Image: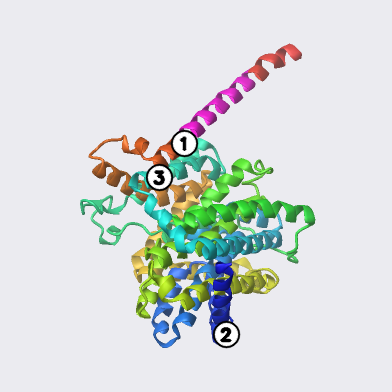
Amino acid sequence: MEVLNNLAFGFSHALTLQNLMFCALGCTVGTLVGLLPGLGPLATISLLLPLTYSIDTTGALIMLAGIYYGAQYGDSVSAITMKIPHASSIVACIDGYAMTLKGKTGLALFTAGFSSFIGGTVAIVVLAFLAPSLGEVAFLFGPADYCALMLVGFVCVSFVTTGSLLNGLAMCMVGVLLGSIGTDVNSGLARFTWDAPFLADGVGIVSIALGCFGIAEIAKNLDSREERSPFNGKIKLMPTWPEFKRIIPSALRGSVVGSILGILPGGGPVIAQFAAYALDKKVSKYRHEIGTGCIEGVAGQAAADEAAARTSFIPLMSIGIPENAVMALMMAAFIIKGIQPGPNMIAGHPELFWGLVASMWIGNCFLLVLNVPLVRYWLSVFKIPYNVLFPAILFFCCIGTYSINNNLDDVFITVAFGALGYLFMRLEMDPSPLMLGFILGPMLEENFRRSMLLSRGSFEVFINRPISGTLISLIAAFVLWQTVAFFRQRGKAKELVVTEPVAS
């Protein structure tokens, strides 16, 4: 009952004309940022942060939050229609783009938009009911626990890859090596930089994502020498009832996964999409279709992406810890307004906290309208002939890459990864596991080294701690189960080979 009273208090602030305007503005800008390939919420919020000086505190934060979770809605559009992702829509390229090639662009976009609405709604409920106490869960995780959690993430390789498992593991290891480029945070030594100053901070995830997926896909399309556009004909948005029934379970599973991973520092939308996709590929009734253009492959990751974006506000507002770069900018916006996020924020500024939570649900409704019934108008730009469209796409890719660090070297790195991604496509090697390894590799290394320092080199710390011990046990059980299943399949294959001549 207390939560309902608090939400009513929040809506009384969020439903003012001024705050509604800022919420709508943030959602619209966020959708546009997600729609345009190469741009992202980080660069946009960075550019708009100075505007918060002249805007009311609640309205400014509502607008910046709308840009962030609005971009999570819109970023699936370019991934589904053109296979050009942002960091949080990499998985959408797998089944979403495959559905586009099958002429099901409208169905894929409806699935992504509606699933994002479900994910956002579930996450808002979690945020409203559990934010005061749930942020403390992050304190239970030590370095050993995070290390085990990253290992669980590597298990997802067998689900994320659309090719052979061996190719997937190889690509994942390439991603881990790419993630180790840069300055070692512990020793301060440069690793794999070849004395190039622009590699001192490592390779950006945006450069790899846009290169291996976006530019590589453009090169592949140009190489085919066919007149094409991302999709043709009338867009049919509404699914049939059997298709709609397939969206709901996958979206709910993704919402739960995203809500959990959004709370944990180091989690967030990027990892949540891989985890939700892996879960669907394991438990979905249609798991054998995932990877070939399946609704579940779009629904689960879209819901997890949006849910993680909302619940990532929990550690920021509850304990004052930003879990990613966007949340760090949000924290800067709080501090600019003279507010220190942390345990005392809810008690000290209840109108801001509950007003922001209420505005998220209002923004969720705005985004549902922007990304489902109005999506056909957003997509009109993609009906331009491809030979005219691809230079504009390349331009936005370069602008988006350059805008993050204002460094021209990042553009050259993106082009290099575009050539590498094109080579991967010619060799029929899926780049999705590379992204997984790139994201998880540095996090695994950092937490492993911390664990070894705290335990003085003893590996028992991974077994003695309840959380890490449980996670490692689950990994061991999974590996054992997969090994048994592999040998069973080999045994059945040998039986077929032996019995075939006898039957003939």
Query: Looking at the rendered structure, which numbered label has been put on residue 206?
Result: none
Q: Residue at x 48, y 69 (%)?
A: 39
Q: Which residue is mark 2?
A: 16
Q: Earlier in the sequence, mark 3 or mark 1?
A: 3
What amino acid type should be assigned to the residue bearing mark 1?
Ile
Q: Circles 1 and 2: CB distance less than 8 Å?
A: no
Give coordinates of residue 351: x percent, y percent.
48, 78
For this view, does 85 lie left or right of residue 398?
A: right
Give coordinates of residue 398: x percent, y percent.
44, 68
Instruction: Specify whether residue 469 is painted magenta.
Output: no
In the image, residue 344 sits, relative to residue 143, either above or below, namely: below
Q: Which residue is mark 1?
A: 475
Range of the magenta residues?
A: 476-494
Q: Nearer the viewer, residue 452 or 185?
A: 452
Q: Earlier in the sequence, mark 1 or mark 2?
A: 2
What amino acid type should be assigned to the residue bearing mark 3?
Val
Query: Disc 1 to disc 2, how far (Cα)?
Result: 50 Å
- Helix, strand, or loop for circle 3? helix
Q: Circles 3 and 2: CB distance less than 8 Å?
A: no
Query: Disc 3 to disc 2, how far (Cα)?
Result: 51 Å
Q: Comparing marks 1 and 2, which lies closer to the viewer?
A: 2
